[in-house]
């Protein structure tokens, strides 16, 4: 069943970074996938006509932010890394002004107000790439963004595509913050079970539910159907179901 208009957070555990894992995970996905610069995503997109990869501007910004912080404080604001951050900030500022618009209107305004800023950034980055030390953090920021230019421009072609994948980053933050609590998960089965539980919890949060109360309700209702051959009752338990009790909602 398709849930195109629902907020879903889905974790999956794989033991390696083998290309077959994301290829299998994205097999049924159609549309635009916003990722970091991991090459395998680009390879998969080249194999298919129904999948497009969009780059993440937050990953670009992060590299220049690290470059600025690595410099003496007195010279930070005079650095190329700082100027890069200011240009990226301007791109975000202009795009944020369009967040209340519909997809078509946002796309039209992006072409008018955001695209010139993106064009200017890439022209400036190409011009200044050779003026920094090749192995410096600033060079890393320039090289990363120029290598990803094709993908970082995708949001300019589709009003529904955001500048970054911060929504995904925020969804994994609780798991990363608490990772010291998961040292007992030392098997593949345990990691897979953990991914399922976290998928339910974060999807509940994304749909304005209280995770504890939602889990309590699931653990109360599901045992009532253990003998059922028809699993349609699960529809009433999904995080966006209007049949959930009010105590589960924030």
Image (cartoon, rainbow, N blue to C red):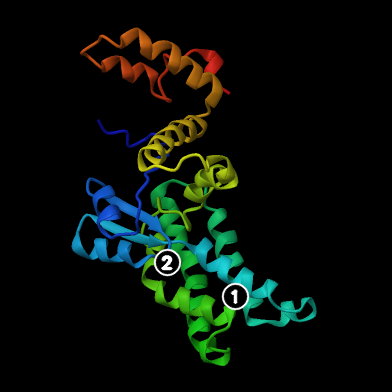
Residue at 31 percent across and 64 percent down: it is 40
Query: Which residue is at a point 60% across and 46% down the rendered structure image?
Result: 177
Residue 54 in picture, x, y percent from top left: 38, 61
Spatial CA distance of label 1 from label 2 is: 15 Å
Q: Is residue 100 visible?
A: no
Q: Which mark is residue 210?
A: none
Which residue is tagged 2?
152
Q: How many neighbours does mark 1 have within 10 angstroms: few (below 14), some (14-19), or many (20 or more)?
A: many
Farthest right residue in view: 74
Compare residues 90 and 27 and report the one nearer the observer: 27
If the image is split into quadrants, where does the N terminus sit? top left
Q: Nearer the viewer, residue 185 or 98?
A: 185
Vertical arrangement, residue 127 with respect to residue 250, above or below: below
Q: How many marks?
A: 2
Q: Mark 1 or 2 closer to N-term?
A: 1
Task: State left or right for residue 66 relative to residue 6.
Answer: right
Helix, strand or loop at label 2? It is: helix
Q: Residue at x 37, y 66 (%)?
A: 151
Place residue 180 in its image quadrant: top right
Residue 86 location, x and y as percent?
64, 71
The reply to whether dot 1 and dot 2 touch (C-beta < 8 Å) is no
Q: Which residue is found at the position 75% from the left and 81% from the top? A: 75
Residue 84, numbered circle: 1
Name the foreground residue: 38 vs 161.
38
Please name whichever residue, 196 or 136, is drawn nearer the observer in this view of the structure: 196
User: Which element type, helix, strand or loop, lies under badge 1?
Assistant: helix
- Pinpoint residue 55: horizontal percent, then vertical percent: 41, 63
* Mark 2 nearby-residue class (10 Å; few <14, some 14–19, many ≥20): many
Task: Identify whether 91 is placed above or below 237.
Answer: below
**Residue 44: x and y, percent?**
25, 61
């Amino acid at each position: 069943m398709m849930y195109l208009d629902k907020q879903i957070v889905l974790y999956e555990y794989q033991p390696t970074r083998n290309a077959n894992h994301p290829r299998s995970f994205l097999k049924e996905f159609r549309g635009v996938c916003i990722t970091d610069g991991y090459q395998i995503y680009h390879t998969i997109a080249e194999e298919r006509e129904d999948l497009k990869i969009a780059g993440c501007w937050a990953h670009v910004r992060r590299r220049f932010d690290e470059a600025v912080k690595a410099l003496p404080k007195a010279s930070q604001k005079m650095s190329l890394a700082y100027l890069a951050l200011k240009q990226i900030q301007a791109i975000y500022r202009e795009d944020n002004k369009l967040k209340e618009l519909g997809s078509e209107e946002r796309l039209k305004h992006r072409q008018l107000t955001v695209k010139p800023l993106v064009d200017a950034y890439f022209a400036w980055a190409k011009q200044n790439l050779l003026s920094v030390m090749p192995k410096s953090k600033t060079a890393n920021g320039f090289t990363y963004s120029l290598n990803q230019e094709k993908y970082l421009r995708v949001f300019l072609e589709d009003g529904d595509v955001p500048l970054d994948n911060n929504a995904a980053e925020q969804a994994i933050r609780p798991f990363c913050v608490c990772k010291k609590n998961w040292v007992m998960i030392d098997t593949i089965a345990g990691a897979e079970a953990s991914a399922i539980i976290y998928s339910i919890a974060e999807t509940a949060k994304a749909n304005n539910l209280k995770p504890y109360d939602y889990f309590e309700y699931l653990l109360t209702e599901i045992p009532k159907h253990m003998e059922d051959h028809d699993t349609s009752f699960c529809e009433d338990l999904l995080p966006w179901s209007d049949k959930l009790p009010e105590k589960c909602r924030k």
